[in-house]
Image (tube, rainbow, N blue to C red):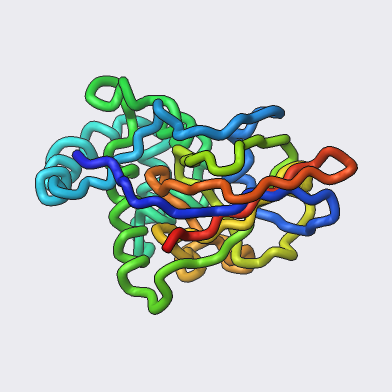
Amino acid sequence: MWRDTILTIAVLYVFHTWTLGVDSKMVKWFLNLIYLDMAPDSVDDMYKGCFGEMNDKVLKKYIPEEFKHNSFKDSWKWANNCANSAICAYTAGHPEIYIEFNKAVRTNKTDYSSSFKFHSLHFLLTDALRLLKNNRKEDCITSYIRTKDKIFAKVNQNIQFGMFTSSSTNREINEMFGANSCFVIKTCFGADLNSYSKWPEELEVLIPPYEVFNVTESIATKSDNQMHTLPRQG
């Protein structure tokens, strides 16, 4: 299994007056004060070099095992008629599996070979993002995130979100998601989910846990809010 080493540069800003927004999938893991780092405990595999082997394991072993997990089973059955079941299972909220899933992805690296419950969804979602990325014309996408919590990162620091992170190409999206921390991100591994999402009006771009960003700028406003920007290097 292979950990991504390609560096994406980004600037991280926070502005009180911004009207950025993002689906609530993004903000569930942010807990008041967050200091971003390389998310060393995250399950951030790209499956490069072992795709075929993992695909066989998912079909023959993990899906049958994980169907015993009720939330996974219910989400997967609901999304069965979707063009991309993994994306629909993640975004649709039948039930809201992304909360438990992303918590596990961000923290369960040491449990991956034992008690990690989401091998199938992690692999299939990673593969779906890879295919969508390979089929688009542009190399990278500029997207935006806002949260109610205060998130900090040092300039020139490399960071990973360490989970499947929702963002939006619409910087004017609803303020309900907060204004304490805002991100401008240039993602080159994330993918536009509009064709599959339950909420296409949100113009969602999903960023994988393995993408690495470098904070090129961090700005605090007079109201002590934070804004960050993350562009691609090179």
Locate residue 28: give its quadrant.
top right
Q: Residue at x 43, y 46 (%)?
A: 212
Q: Residue at x 36, y 49 (%)?
A: 77
Q: Is residue 17 above or below residue 209?
A: below
Q: Nearer the viewer, residue 127 or 39?
A: 39
Picture coordinates of residue 131, whole percent (x, y) = 30, 64
- Whether residue 23 is visible to the viewer of this picture, yes or no, is no
- Whether residue 117 is visible to the viewer of this picture, yes or no, is yes
Picture coordinates of residue 14, whole percent (x, y) = 74, 48
Locate residue 20: give its quadrant.
bottom right
Picture coordinates of residue 121, whole percent (x, y) = 33, 44
Q: Residue at x 41, y 43 (%)?
A: 209
From the viewer's perspective, tell me whether residue 216 is left or right of residue 110.
right
Picture coordinates of residue 33, whole percent (x, y) = 69, 28
Q: Quadrant of the N terminus?
A: top left
Q: Residue at x 57, y 57 (%)?
A: 185
Q: Nearer the viewer, residue 141 or 28?
A: 141
From the viewer's perspective, tell me whether residue 52 is left or right of residue 185.
left
Count of marks placed on residues:
0
Q: Nearer the viewer, residue 189 or 38?
A: 38
Tell which residue pokes out farthest to the right in this image.
222
Q: Quadrant of the C terminus?
A: bottom left
